[in-house]
Image (spheres, grey):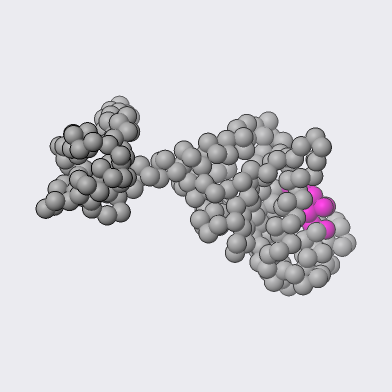
Amino acid sequence: MTNIETRQELTDEFSGIKYILSSGMRSRLLLCIYKNPKNLDDLRHDLKKPSATILHGLKELETINLVKKVKKSYELTSNGYLLTTNMIKLIDNWYSVNKTKDFWNNHDLSDLPEEVLKNIYLLKDAECVTSTTSNLSNAFNRYLKLISDANRLKIILPIYSENHFKYLTELLEKNKLESLDLVINKKILDSLKKHELFTENFLQNEKVNVICSNRDLKLFLTYSDDFMSLSLFFNDGHYDDSQILIAKDENAVKWASSLINYYKWRETWKDI
């Protein structure tokens, strides 16, 4: 298939999507009967609209095979269910990005793969924590609080920071951490080896599994059983330590796990 044919197909599909989303009634009807079939009285009660308006919208959706009438109730066809599922995902993705737009703006997203970005809706309950001129360490302190309560950690760490490693070493020495999987690049590994404290109390700790990446990843990802955090680089290549995205729900942890698994299968990582 040529690029021209592909673009034409996308244009045709967009016309169909636009037909649904450009009408509040059509989209609301799909959402209203997404979980369960409903009769006209149910729809009139839920949508607070007159019967004539609702029946007109239902007729339009029946015409394009998204809704069908079974006895006295209306329900989604298979096509309608698939389209509505993805419409909900689109709405959630839009909500998620818009809610934390200050975090995503002006940051380098090149190391966030497309298949992971498509599921950004999983971060809809995330919070963007920002440092201010009156509290320059706000983001970092929130991060330290998060990891201090964790039993197991998985981290992609793209920068060398003695403060980070000192705190992780302290958690290990106090037996607060059961395990730590750490992905770093060779430069960071070499810096750790030059530091006697980190060599003996961190790299040689049996609870620590250090993995060396074959390239410099431009994301700082941390997750455990009950939280995830993400910080990124500016577009000019400098790491931004003033903003961090934090979430404590299962969906966000699932998103973080999918991100690290993406690189696990696509990159050459070497256990140290």
Q: Residue at x 76, y 45 (%)?
A: 138
Q: Is residue 208 above or below residue 144?
A: below
Left or right: 89 with respect to 134?
left
Task: Please state the horizontal and vertical placement of residue 158, each as a whole percent of the image.
Answer: 69, 48
Quadrant of the image for the N terminus?
top left
Name the dominant secondary structure of the magenta segment. Answer: helix
Quadrant of the image for the C terminus?
bottom right
Whether residue 107 appears in this view of the structure is: yes
Task: Please state the horizontal and vertical placement of residue 7, each as a whole percent of the image.
Answer: 32, 29
Magenta highlight on residue 234: no
- Range of residues picked out in magenta: 159-166
Which quadrant of the structure image shows residue 226? bottom right
Magenta highlight on residue 164: yes
Q: Residue at x 75, y 40 (%)?
A: 131
Whether residue 2 appears in this view of the structure is: no
Residue extending farthest right: 196
- 237, 24: nearer the viewer: 24
Q: Residue at x 80, y 41 (%)?
A: 135
- 87, 272: nearer the viewer: 87
Q: Residue at x 78, y 54 (%)?
A: 164
Task: Please state the horizontal and vertical placement of residue 69, each as a whole percent of the image.
Answer: 14, 48
**Number of marks:** 0
Which quadrant of the structure image shows residue 189? bottom right
Left or right: 107 with respect to 159?
left
Q: Is residue 72 above or below residue 202?
A: above
Task: Please state the horizontal and vertical placement of residue 262, each as a whole percent of the image.
Answer: 52, 53
Which quadrant of the structure image shows residue 271? bottom right
